[in-house]
Amino acid sequence: MNIFLHTAMGMLGGLGIFLYGMYIASEGLKKSSSKHLKEFLKKVTTNQLFGAFAGVVLAAVMQSSSAATVMVVGFVNAGLMTLRQAMGVMLGTAIGTTITVQLIAFKMTDYSLLFIAIGSFLFIIGSSTKVKSIASIFLGFGFVFFGMGIITDAMAPLQTNPEFMNAFVYLSDHLILMVLASLLFTAIIQNSAATIALAMSLGASGTLQLETAIAIVYGANAGTVVTALISSINTTKDAKRTAVAHAFFKLIGVLIFLPLTEYFAVFMESIGSDIERQIANAHSIFNIVNLLILLPFCNKFADWMLKLIPEKKETIKEVKYIDPESLEVPTVALMKTKKELERMAKIIDDNMFIGIDRLLRNKDSSKHDTIIKNESKIDVLYKSIYHYLQKITKKDISDDESVESLKYLYINSDLEEIADSLQQITYTLMKLDERNIKLNDKELSGITNFYKEVRINYIEAIKGFEGEDKEMAIKMIQQSPGVLRIEKKLRYEHFHNSDSESSRLSSTYIRIINELLKINQRTVSISHTTIGLI
């Protein structure tokens, strides 16, 4: 068989096993840490050092700086993280993925089959999600190391091939070309660790000199920006700024190190035992030094990004926070779903509840169209959130995530029903306007007061949901019987004291009361869901 075909088969097959192993390990890490990841991300503060540490952890869990960076862009887009907070986190993500490269340099390829054996055994005997997640971690890293071994063996024959060696000699004299080639390859496979692992295999086989391998490290780090930039295309301005800032961070790092590559290689040789260890150390030191240089300027970078990408008035999208990329990390996808539900609840309060209030008080007919249009927005949001949650539930998620998904499905349905009822009240009031019929002062006053109580309950229920405040949710549930008493009183007074005009309006009056009662029932349901009664 042709030497190049044999090498290509070994390299591609080994790379496939490597990437598959990274995927399995990442899935296992995400499942085992999902419960803590949500709380951890909530604690990211304006302290850039803590943010950088958060980035290290996130990338270590994702096992890909590209994926971690895309996730950070998503956090900013969802409002889970500010632009300033994201700066430090971005720098930290680069360090998180150096862990895998360091493990490879420890000659873990010799123990790949042991990792696979442990992972397989745990899968067979394990019944809980936690044990299977740990099994995935062992299996994943086993495949990573096994794939790395296959790549190294496949590269060995090339060190005696003059054509291949001449090509690398040429590239060794043109490091910028090697950086660009490495950047392109990383952008295609979306995994910088895999690119560096190839460099380590080439180095171990004697094909690659250290300086050229370090150029590959530069390109692999720079290549991670492509995925983030693409993911930011249809996002908020701050998310775009985050992706662009990340690109600048990497570019600055490469520009600082590239002219010093010769001295950097000498330094790596002095502290590393073999070329694989030297390449792994170069990858780690590049990112650590980059972080130390740029971390003090993170807030300044955020200010520069605001000037570079100024704010423009954008068309408001029906769906703002949820995105397909986040589905890869169900914990994050659920956090974004919650943000979308909170936004949905705010639209209902700001544009529909308030509109009904003005219709009742001032007969502001312009509010009819506003309420109806916003109900259409709520329908779009409801469908989008429903399908998004269905996709989450099809993932291999934990029991806690499954319960959380179910909660959000309930609340999504409740909010949509509340919007429907507000629309029905609007249609009823429109009919009254068209017929030039008015409720008498007593009936109007009764409905207005009833409406106010229902809205107060709604606001408190949403606050309880947003803050995961069970005490507030319980308080709202306890207030509900008061609303029922008001409803019974209004109904009784209407039938007991009705005159001819009220009798004619009876069905309209009762219809409005019934819709307000439905809204309150759905509001109570939201509070029940908040405290876990589903």
Image (cartoon, grey):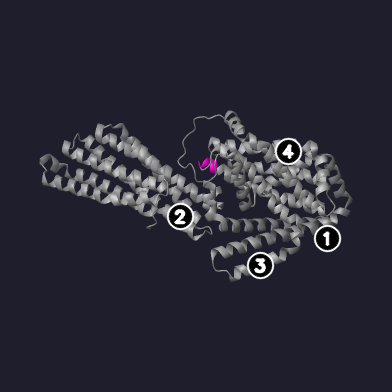
Pick the quarter of the image with the N terminus: bottom right
Provide residue 448's location: percent of width, then percent of height: 24, 39
Q: Which image quadrant for residue 529?
A: bottom left
Residue 514 in the magenta stretch? The answer is: no
Could you say which is closer to the camera, residue 5 or residue 148?
Answer: 148
Q: Mark 1–mark 4 contact, CB under 8 Å?
A: no
Q: Mark 3–mark 2 contact, CB under 8 Å?
A: no
Q: Is the magenta stretch mostly helix, strand or loop?
A: helix
Q: Which image quadrant for residue 30?
A: bottom right
Mark 4: which amino acid? Val
- Say which residue label 3 marks: 118
Q: How far apart are marks 1 and 4 (CA)?
A: 40 Å
Q: Which residue is drawn at 26% across and 42% down?
A: 451
Mark 2: which amino acid? Ser
Most extreme residue toward the bottom, as rendered? Answer: 125
Name the mark on residue 254.
4
Q: Mark 3–mark 4 contact, CB under 8 Å?
A: no
Residue 78 in the magenta stretch? The answer is: yes
Q: What stretch is highlighted in magenta?
A: 75-79
How many residues crowd mark 1 within 10 Å: few (<14), some (14–19), many (20+)? Answer: few
Q: In this view, does 390 lie to the left or right of 260?
A: left
Q: How many marks do you count on the picture? A: 4
Q: How far apart are marks 1 and 3 (CA)?
A: 36 Å
Under circle 3, the secondary element is helix
Under circle 1, the secondary element is loop
- Lower sequence index among marks 3 and 2: 3
- Say which residue label 2 marks: 405
Observer-side mark, 1 or 3, equals: 3
Mark 3: which amino acid? Ile
Mark 1: which amino acid? Met
